[in-house]
Amino acid sequence: MTKERLISYFFERNYMIAPDLFKKIPDDFDYDEFVKKNNLQKAGNVVSLSEEMFNNFVYKSNINLNNEIITKVEVIDPYVDKPKKREVKDFVLYMKARYHALKTILLQRNELSTAVSISKVHSKKPKEAVAIIGLIYKIDKTKNGNYILEMEDPTGMIKVIITQKNEDLIEIMNELVLDEVVGIVGTVAENAIFVKEIIFPDLPLKEYKKCRDDVSVVFLSDLHIGSNLFAKEEFERFIDWINLDFGTDEQKEYAAKVRYLIVSGDLIDGVGIYPGQEKELTFKDVYEQYNEVARYFSKIRKDITIVMAAGNHDALRLSEPQPPLNRDFAKKLYQIENVMLVNNPAFVRIHNMFDILIYHGASFDYYLNNIDILRKAGSYDASDKMMEFILKKRHLTPTHISSMYIPDVEKDPLVINRIPDFFVTGHIHHDIKISSYKNITLIGCSAFQNITAYQEKLGHTNVIPAKVPVVNLKTREIKIMDFRNQEDQDS
């Protein structure tokens, strides 16, 4: 009787089912559940159901959403800017605040437990062991291959010398950047220190967490809605998939477990961001662009909590931390009940236990273009190496000129004080990158924009859009969904 009811349901709405499809309806098919989950409108003309359409309608009803799972997202220590006129002294106080925050981290290392201020080094005897914590002011390489660092702290400056004979230290020199804070262990020389060890703030090994609930989190970035190069069809497939309307049965099972969606910036393409952009815009107004973003995200299941941060293409200041999206521009996004808008960077806790560091990644351009060790690792094709590089330094933009920032005189909000379970970034647009560092899952997201003329001009030829990581929080297994093809695949 159930099969006949299903045939009647489709027939009343002008849909015809071929006899061979009729045979595929399972004997235990739940008709009432099917009607509850589908609101099929009457077609204007008679439509013959293809096998794909039939499967999307019928098998969607067989996938159960666990509505008993309670989701929770908590924003940890959100940054609130205090508007004021910025003066030169604010930048000095900001750098001091950064120094003291990173010094506190470094002092937890046994090798630096006896660290002294730079001013006290000058009173020590030659060849006496010494440890300091300082900010790198200058890096020089001598003709004979030695390195000389000028380092400073609030009490003064000193030169530290790394000899070419110490190959391990020379290797570390390739990772050093101006303005970062490191620990130095060595021996006293005349107005200098001979270095034996360089210590980064770095991270301790993180506990590898798993939860009891069979739930998943999805990560997106760089949608660039408003661009005529926005991967519209692919993104609509993503929306259909997350709503259980697209994909194989197995892929729909992945989607049914999703309860969190994190977007790490560049929701829109913006206006006036790069030369010639106006020729590549479908919507030339940021209000229209954000309205289109809201139209898409309003379609997503309401049992999924969506967390959105901004990026350098979004309509707000470039200086970091960036505030949540502007309410005037993104009014309709604020009206969506399951959307949370957060700072960039942001630190959020999901499901009461997983900490996620969200950072769009605007500072990455500087390091990928200027640091040899990152260029040799693959540059823009190795965003995971970039993320490791940043975590070791415990700072998202350690070099002064790598990013615009707000000089907060009380604290540096770009210091990585907390240890995340996940570190997720975007900005790069190259193929998705996933790796692990100290049990922290690193995710460099793909984009949903096809390659632009500006990117081609800069040599970014490996732009691969529309690949989405799905992380199961019970197993920590990661599936990569590829929405570039009609027949969706995972890997």
Image (tube, rainbow, N blue to C red):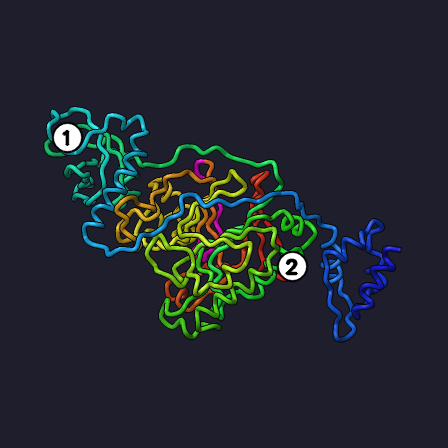
Q: Nearer the viewer, mark 2 or mark 1?
A: 1
Q: Position of residue 169 (x, y in %)?
A: 27, 35
- As for residue 373 lying within the magenta part, the answer is no
Q: Does the rendering let one see residue 368?
A: no
- Image side of residue 409 versus residue 343, left or right: left
Q: Pointer 2: what residue?
A: 487
What residue is disc 1 on? Answer: 121
Amino acid residing under circle 2 = Glu
Asked if residue 435 is among those painted magenta in the image, a careful observer would answer yes
Determine the image quadrant of residue 5: bottom right
Instruction: Answer whether labels 2 and 1 touch (C-beta < 8 Å).
Output: no
Q: Quadrant of residue 93?
A: top left
412 or 395: nearer the viewer: 412
Residue 84 vertical placement versus 73 (above, below): below
The magenta segment: 426-438
Find residue 265 and report its horizontal and vertical position in percent. Answer: 44, 56
